[in-house]
Amino acid sequence: MNGTQPGTIMFYEECFGEIGGRFRQILPPWSRLRLMTDGLTLRSFVDLTQCLHGAQCRDPNVFAYVGKALGAWIEGLLSELGVDAEPLVKGEVHQSAILSGRVYVAPGAVVEPMAYIQGPCYIGPGAEVRHCAYIRGNVYVGRDAVVGHTTEVKGSIFWDGAKAGHFAYVGDGVLGRNVNLGAGTKLANLPLRRGLIRLKHPTSGTLISSGLEKFSAILGDGAQTGCNAVLSPGTLLLPGTAVMPCVHFRGTLTAGTAR
């Protein structure tokens, strides 16, 4: 099975329907993911050498860092930090905030009033989880990153300096270093037509499958969205790109600004 070429499973599903889908199901989850990437890696979007835990991202598959697969990576990190079944707090957590399960709050991190954090979750040094934020598990918040007021996050990475400061939703996605989401930005993770989410490869232009039924977007280092922008499932924004305010975008933005 290790010799199967990228796209083979998608071919089976498209050509043989339910039978092909059963072929996919007999593969272990990690194998299914690797077959879908077509050379797309996390390093295509994020300079991991500048990230606090970048060296620990050993799986080249970019989709290993969203959703439940991300949870497994975070669990390993929490174990290294000595986190057991209960939260381990070394930063500042307001007494009205609720932390549940395996949660690590690093020195210098701040969790403001009424925030709710469900593990597994890592909150890095200097990070902020602001008033009424809701973190639903399988979330990594990097050094100096911000999960803002009434912002909801699940199954996602905020790499160092990434910010979703106000009223955002980030589901099953990746924010690169110093990404900034304008107020009200939504990263939608579940398409209206259910199924494996596909996306356009940024270099080959071919349509590939993520192997995931829930996946929103990957935003490269320094990418930005304006207020109330919406990114639909299967979106890729390469480093330095931007989406203007109130724009709905789905696809792959390799350069410039989506208007």
Image: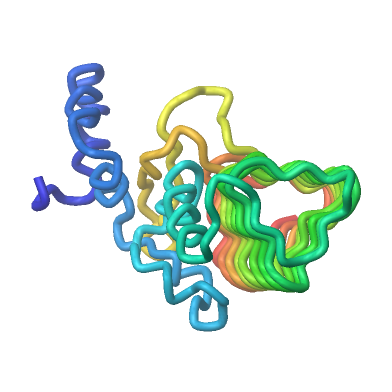
Q: Position of residue 220 (x, y in %)?
A: 58, 67
- In the rendered image, the quadrant that contains the N terminus is top left
36 vs 172, nearest the viewer: 172
Name the image quarter holding the C terminus: bottom right
**Image coloring type:** rainbow
How far from the left and from the top, in percent, is residue 161? 71, 72
Extreme residue in the bottom direction: 49
Q: Residue at x 48, y 23 (%)?
A: 194
Residue at the location (22% across, 35% down)?
11
Which residue is found at the position 76% from the left and 66% from the top? 91
Residue that appears at 40% across and 44% down: 210
Instruction: Determine if residue 237 is in view.
Output: yes
Left or right side of 178 for 200: left
Q: Nearer the viewer, residue 28 or 177?
A: 28
The x, y position of residue 65, in whole percent, is 46, 54
Can residue 226 be seen here?
Answer: no
Q: How many marks?
A: 0
Would you place residue 143 above or below residue 202 in this image? below
Q: Quadrant of residue 93?
A: bottom right
Residue 209, by quadrant, is top left
Using the image as rendered, state which of residue 254 and residue 64 is in the foreground.
64
